[in-house]
Image (spheres, helix red, strand yellow):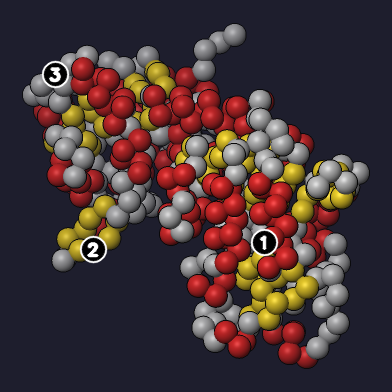
Amino acid sequence: MRVDFNVPLEKKSGTIAVRDDRRLRAVLPSLELLQQAKAKIILISHLGRPNGRVVPELSLAPVAQYLNEKLHRPVTFVADCAGPLTQAAVREQAPGSILLLENLRFYPEETADSAQFAKKLAQLADVYVNEAFSNAHRAHASMVGVTKFLPSLAGLALAEEVATLTNLIHKPKRPFVVVLGGAKISDKVAALTNLARIADLVLIGGAIANNFLSAEGFEIYRSLVEEASNKGAGDYVAVARQLIVEHKTEKILKDTYIPLPKLLYPIDVIAAPNLDTTDVSKLKTIDLSHDMADHPEKSKLQYFDIGPKTRQLYSELLAGAGTIFWNGPMGVWENPLFAAGTKTVAQAIVASHATTVLGGGDTIAAAHHFHVEHKFTSVSAAGGAALKFLGGEPLPGLQPLLIPT
């Protein structure tokens, strides 16, 4: 079973421990089902980016220990992936027992999708189960190569995640409101483009909003605007401008009579000289509708959160939603001075009567910080894979699992 145990670790009393077990808990239903059937279970996963080298700090041994001690799921750790040590452990394995193999990415063959490495993994088992949706956008040996040698099935969690995202695209309860934030628009261009066609309303925040503000001619001073690495500066501003043009005639009615654009970005922002600012007196609330006159002190400002008017507007619009998908914080919420936007939006989403889907690691961390994570209808830790799926891109890890039609 290919799982995603790429979990955050932390040092405690000199030992490495699991900080967040969400991805471990996600596979427990599949493990329980297989154990009831007396299957011998071999778990394979990656952890971090060791780049084909053995990095002791990225060993999966602490994960095995956590499964044993905290989740009461007896697991035997094997400090190997496809060599003699693993083969011996599999031969001695009892029905219903679980092995967890060492980090796949300690082997350069994994990310190279080596057929030879995939075959070695496949020779350990009779059936392959994929429970790693969050890695489904990677054409790696454990995601794609193994499926060429074994009957391949979707795990329960993977199937549920695909069903949830498919429903977002094809049959959301309307109005369907998308909330997109975060720092990098490049990761979300395809999803933003596709969801803008499907959704009734898109609420934009975070540094992504700077691209739209710049495209509309607003001054953003020193605020972050992502530059395309291979096409030169300004490309993502052009993307934002194109999206604005495509959807400029589409409107949503607020209070049944006030027309608003389908793509909404902040009408006011919280600005400061830098993101580490701790002095409240250095914060400025800039109303983008009339505070744009140039002053020398403004040239040093950056936008780090949505402002109070935007918070109120977004909250009112979210209250009437039928379905909400949220990916990306509204500001630099890790600094308490810039946390109000993300907190307000998070609370507005869970206070609504909508079907709510939370996506992406940074967004989950923010929701957890504000104690609302458990109130979402569905939580997806598969940030990159989920956004590519919502963008309409075929995922290499899913293709072998599809039933031909």
Measured in 3D between alpha carbons, the distance from the residue under mark 2 to the one under mark 1, in whole angstroms, is 37 Å
Going 54% across and 82% down the picture, which residue do you hit?
277
Measured in 3D between alpha carbons, the distance from the residue under mark 3 to the one under mark 1, in whole angstroms, is 55 Å
Q: Which residue is mark 3?
A: 95
Q: Disc count in the image?
A: 3
Going 83% across and 77% down the picture, which residue do you hit?
292
Q: Which residue is mark 2?
A: 11
- Say whether residue 56 is visible: no
Task: Report crowding for label 2: few under 14, some 14 to 19, many 20 or more residues within 10 A (C-alpha).
Answer: few
Towards the viewer: 269 or 132: 269
Q: Which residue is mark 1?
A: 311
Q: Decide: is 368 above or below 277.
A: above
Residue type at numbered disc 3: Pro
Mark 3: secondary structure: loop
Mark 1: secondary structure: helix
Q: Decide: is 97 above or below 66.
A: above
Of all residues shown, which one is farthest toward the right?
A: 249
Going 33% across and 32% down the picture, which residue do you hit?
27
Quadrant housing the C terminus: top right
Give the percent coordinates (x, y) of residue 315. Answer: 66, 54
Residue type at numbered disc 2: Lys
Residue type at numbered disc 1: Arg
Mark 2: secondary structure: strand
Q: Earlier in the sequence, mark 2 or mark 3?
A: 2
Give the percent coordinates (x, y) of residue 254. Answer: 81, 48
Measured in 3D between alpha carbons, the distance from the residue under mark 2 to the one under mark 3, in whole angstroms, is 34 Å
Give the percent coordinates (x, y) of residue 345. Answer: 60, 55
Q: Is 47 left, or right, of 316 in this rendering?
A: left
Whether residues under marks 2 and 3 lie with C-beta atoms below 8 angstroms apart, the answer is no
Going 29% across and 34% down the picture, which residue do you hit?
44
